[in-house]
Amino acid sequence: MDIVNDFRKKGFRLIRKFEGLTANDLIEILRNVPRDTKVCTQMLGENFSVKQVEECIYYDFENGKRVKEHKGVLIK
């Protein structure tokens, strides 16, 4: 799926996937911005540049119980 072109055709400036963006989605998105652009994350209504990226573990839950464990990336 070409996530950037799909959204660009519709005139959007926001890309959101409720199931979560994959590493491939982020790579595809970042290919379309100038290389010296800072990446920011929103905290408390303000934008802060990303300072740290680390591996993380996240879980799928069903009926309040952990069902499946996944490896992911945490961007701070």
Image (cartoon, rainbow, N blue to C red):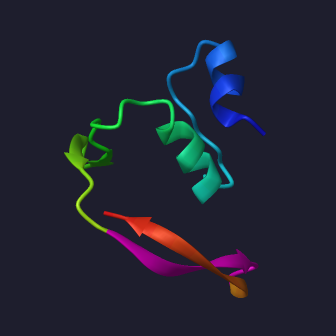
- Measured as percent of width and height from the top left, residue 16 is found at 59, 39
Q: Quadrant of the N terminus?
A: top right
* Above or below 10: residue 63: below
The span picked out in magenta is: 53-64
Residue 29 among those drawn in magenta: no
As drawn, 15 above or below 9: below
In this view, which residue lies farthest toward the front?
Answer: 35
Q: Residue at x 43, y 68 (%)?
A: 74
Residue 44 on image: x %, y %? 24, 49
Q: Residue at x 42, y 30 (%)?
A: 33
Vertical placement of 30 versus 10: above or below? below
Above or below: residue 40 compared with residue 19: above
Residues 26 and 10: in front is 26
The quarter holding residue 28 reads: top right
Closer to the camera in the image, 54 or 47 = 54
Number of labelled discs?
A: 0
> What's the residue at 62%, 30% (across, down)?
4
Name the spot of residue 8 as percent of width and height, x first.
62, 19
Res 22 visible? no
Query: Looking at the image, can residue 43 be seen?
Result: yes
Q: Residue at x 70, y 78 (%)?
A: 61
Q: Position of residue 73 (x, y in %)?
A: 49, 69
Is residue 31 found left or right of 21 in the rendered image?
left
Q: Give the overall secondary structure of the magenta segment.
A: strand
Q: Quadrant of the C terminus?
A: bottom left
Asked if the stretch drawn in magenta spans residue 57, the answer is yes
